[in-house]
Image (cartoon, rainbow, N blue to C red):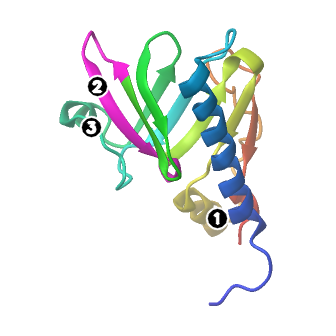
Amino acid sequence: MARSGIDYGGMMHRALQGLIADVLEGVAEHGLPGDHHFFITFDTRDEGVEMADWLRERYPEEMTIVIQHWFDNLTVDDEGFTVTLNFGNSPEPLRIPFDALRTFVDPSVEFGLRFETQESEDEDDEDGNEDGDDSPDGGPNGGGEVVQLDRWRK
C-alpha cells in the first residue's frame, strides 16, 4: 500500500536521531559538561551493531550502556556512533547504529527519548489498546520526559 502525505513520524524519528548525534559529537569533542551522563539502550540484534561475542551472549536482545566516568574513542557519523567502554577492567569497543537505539536518557536534567519498535506498534494495533506507558520512570533517578514517536505512525 503506497503512502501519501507527509511522514511526520519518520521525519521526527530522524530529527531526534540527529539531536542525539549532535549531543554525542559535542561530548566527543569537549567531554561531558557538568553532571551530564547518558543511559543508552539499544537492540543488540540490529545488523549494524558491533560488539564482542561475549557481550552479545550476555545481552542477546537489548543492552544499556552508561557514558559517564570512563569512555574512550567516542566517534559519531551519519549512521551511528562508536565508543570504547570498560567492562570489568576489559575495554571493549562498541558500534551502535542510531536505528538500533531504544532509549536515550540524561538523568542529570531529566531528559529522555524512547524509540518504539515496529513490533510493539503492531502489538498495540492488534489488540486495539495502547498499553498506557505514558509515565515511564525516565531512568534510575526517575521523572524523565519521554517522547514516544511511533505511537502516531499508521
| Mark sitting earlier along the chain (1/2) | 2
Q: CA distance from mark 1 to mark 2?
A: 41 Å
Q: Position of residue 99 (x, y in %)?
A: 51, 53
Q: Residue furthest front?
A: 29
Against 20, residue 106 (above or below) is above
Q: CA distance from mark 3 to mark 2?
A: 12 Å
Q: Tag 1: residue type?
A: Asp
Q: Position of residue 21 (x, y in %)?
A: 60, 41
Q: Nearer the viewer, mark 3 or mark 2?
A: 2
Q: Are marks 3 and 2 in contact (CB under 8 Å)?
A: no
Q: Which residue in the structure is indicated by mark 1?
A: 127
Q: Which residues are magenta?
A: 85-100
Q: Position of residue 70 (x, y in %)?
A: 44, 12
Inspect the magenta stretch and tell me whether residue 22 lies in it.
no
Q: Which mark is residue 92?
A: 2
Residue shown at 49% from the left, 52% from the top:
79
Q: Position of residue 13 (x, y in %)?
A: 67, 55
Q: Tag 3: residue type?
A: Arg
Against 14, residue 5 (above or below) is below
Q: Nearer the viewer, mark 3 or mark 1?
A: 3
Residue shown at 43% from the left, 42% from the top:
96
Q: Residues within 10 Å of mark 2 (few under 14, many from 20)?
A: some
- Of the 4 image quadrants, the one containing the C terminus is bottom right
Apparent side of residue 46 relative to residue 10 in the rendered image (left or right): left
Q: Secondary structure at mark 3?
A: helix
| Mark sitting earlier along the chain (3/1) | 3
Q: Are marks 1 and 2 in contact (CB under 8 Å)?
A: no
